[in-house]
Image (cartoon, grey):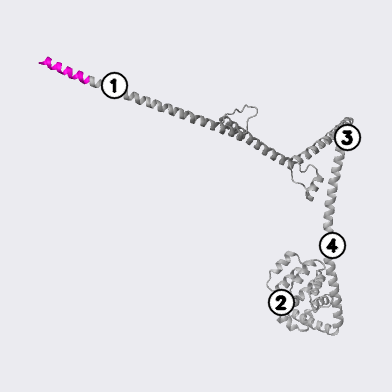
């Protein structure tokens, strides 16, 4: 901003403060046009009134860029203050200016009685009044031309702002692309260095292992023959596995695989159900082992029963438990009959012996009675002899 533009701003400072309406759109345009930084805008927003905000704006703007005055007028017009923007442009284009010294020369008594700041106030007041009347006359005479000019200027400002925003976006995109290009170049250089390093290592490996290529070829041929033999063994193994799979399926008695999913699995891999069939076969084998164990226990019980029924387990053709029991029952009946007959015989013999013992008992009692009589006679005879002796 040149000296004349600073004077215009300073001269019409109070006029701008009174007529400029502060808004968010005005703030955005001030930052977009480069008249304010984010920190400056934050500092201005701390003010309470719009007059204080405008005052701070006018304090900062003259210290900014060279085209600050033109940009400030454009921002003021774009925010809706057409008259104020046109007024500032006209003032900047006006060459002559009211000089208070001429007035004081014509009225010398004012110069003697007024102090400097009072002279300054009078000068400012007169200039404001003159400018207001001047602007009224201009707007009255050329209202249509001014309106057309302002519309054209507004359209230009709109296009300029849109172009500036688009240019800013393009600049940001260009900056991003430049960063990406820089990163890509760095990555490309890194990859080139890696390729060069790999080429060097490859050359070193070729030089180092050039003598062993023939050996590797022989080994490769041997490996091919081994691979062929292994392939043949693998084919035979597959045949064996196929037979095992068929037998497993037959012996396992697995459920038929009729679903589409089972068929797809078997088509993809014919051995996909071998583990399941093997599990089923193992379960059957375990069940058979349990049955075998139970059978052996039953055989032991049978042999034990047969031994108690009078049969030997070592016989070649031992009878069944039913036949053995029938034979045992028949023999038992025969033995019972025999025992009954013997018991009857022994009963008879017992009766005879009992009668004989009774006869013997009677004979002994009679003998005892006879002996007692004899002993009584002997005792009486002894008593008589004793009496005689005593006498």
Q: Which-is-in-front pick, marks 4 and 3?
A: 3
| Cβ–Cβ under 8 Å for marks 2 and 1 | no
- What is the quadrant of residue 348 in the picture? top left
- What is the quadrant of residue 334 in the picture? top right
| Cβ–Cβ under 8 Å for marks 4 and 3 | no
Density class for disc 1 (Cα within 10 Å; few <14, some 14-19, many ≥20) is: few
CA–CA distance between discs 1 and 3? Answer: 145 Å
Question: Would you place residue 32 above or below residue 241 in this image?
Answer: below
Q: From which residue to which does the magenta span run?
A: 375-391
Q: Mark 3 points at which residue?
A: 206
Circle nearer the N terminus (4, 3):
4
**Image quadrant containing the N terminus:** bottom right
| Cβ–Cβ under 8 Å for marks 1 and 3 | no
CA–CA distance between discs 2 and 1? Answer: 192 Å
Q: Which mark is residue 134?
A: none
Density class for disc 4 (Cα within 10 Å; few <14, some 14-19, many ≥20) is: few
Residue 5 falls inside the magenta stretch: no
Looking at the image, which is closer to me, 314 or 36? 314
Q: Residue 367 carries which label?
A: 1
Residue drawn 76% across and 73% down? 10
Q: Residue 117 carries which label?
A: 2
């Amino acid at each position: 901003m040149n000296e004349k533009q600073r004077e215009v701003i300073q001269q019409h400072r109070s006029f701008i403060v009174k007529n400029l309406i502060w808004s968010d759109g005005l703030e955005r345009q001030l930052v977009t046009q480069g008249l304010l930084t984010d920190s400056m805008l934050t500092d201005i927003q701390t003010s309470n009134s719009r007059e204080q905000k405008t005052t701070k704006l006018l304090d900062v703007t003259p210290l900014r860029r060279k085209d600050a005055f033109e940009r400030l007028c454009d921002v003021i017009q774009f925010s809706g203050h057409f008259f104020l923007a046109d007024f500032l442009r006209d003032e900047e284009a006006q060459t002559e200016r009211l000089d208070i010294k001429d007035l004081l020369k014509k009225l010398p008594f004012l110069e003697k009685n007024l102090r400097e700041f009072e002279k300054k106030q009078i000068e400012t007041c007169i200039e404001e009044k003159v400018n207001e009347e001047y602007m009224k006359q201009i707007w009255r005479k050329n209202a249509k031309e001014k309106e057309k000019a302002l519309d054209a200027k507004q359209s230009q400002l709109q296009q300029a702002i849109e172009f500036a925003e688009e240019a800013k976006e393009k600049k940001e995109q260009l900056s991003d692309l430049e960063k990406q290009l820089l990163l890509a170049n760095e990555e490309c250089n890194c990859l080139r260095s890696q390729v060069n390093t790999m080429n060097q290592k490859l050359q070193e490996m070729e030089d180092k292992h050039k003598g062993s290529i023939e050996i590797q070829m022989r080994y490769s041929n041997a490996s091919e023959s081994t691979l062929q033999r292994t392939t043949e063994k693998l084919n035979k193994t597959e045949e064996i596995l196929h037979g095992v799979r068929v037998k497993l399926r037959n012996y396992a008695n697995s459920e038929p695989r009729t679903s589409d999913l089972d068929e797809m699995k078997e088509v993809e891999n014919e051995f996909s159900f071998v583990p399941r069939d093997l599990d089923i076969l193992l379960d059957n084998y375990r069940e058979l082992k349990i049955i075998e164990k139970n059978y052996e226990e039953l055989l032991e019980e049978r042999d034990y029963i047969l031994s108690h029924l009078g049969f030997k387990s070592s016989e070649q053709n031992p009878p069944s438990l039913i036949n053995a029991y029938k034979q045992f029952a028949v023999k038992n009946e025969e033995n019972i009959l025999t025992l009954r007959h013997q018991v009857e015989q022994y009963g008879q013999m017992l009766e005879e012996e009992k009668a004989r013992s009774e006869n013997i008992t009677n004979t002994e009692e009679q003998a005892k009675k006879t002996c007692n009589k004899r002993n009584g006679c002997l005792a009486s005879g002894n008593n008589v002899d004793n009496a005689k002796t005593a006498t």
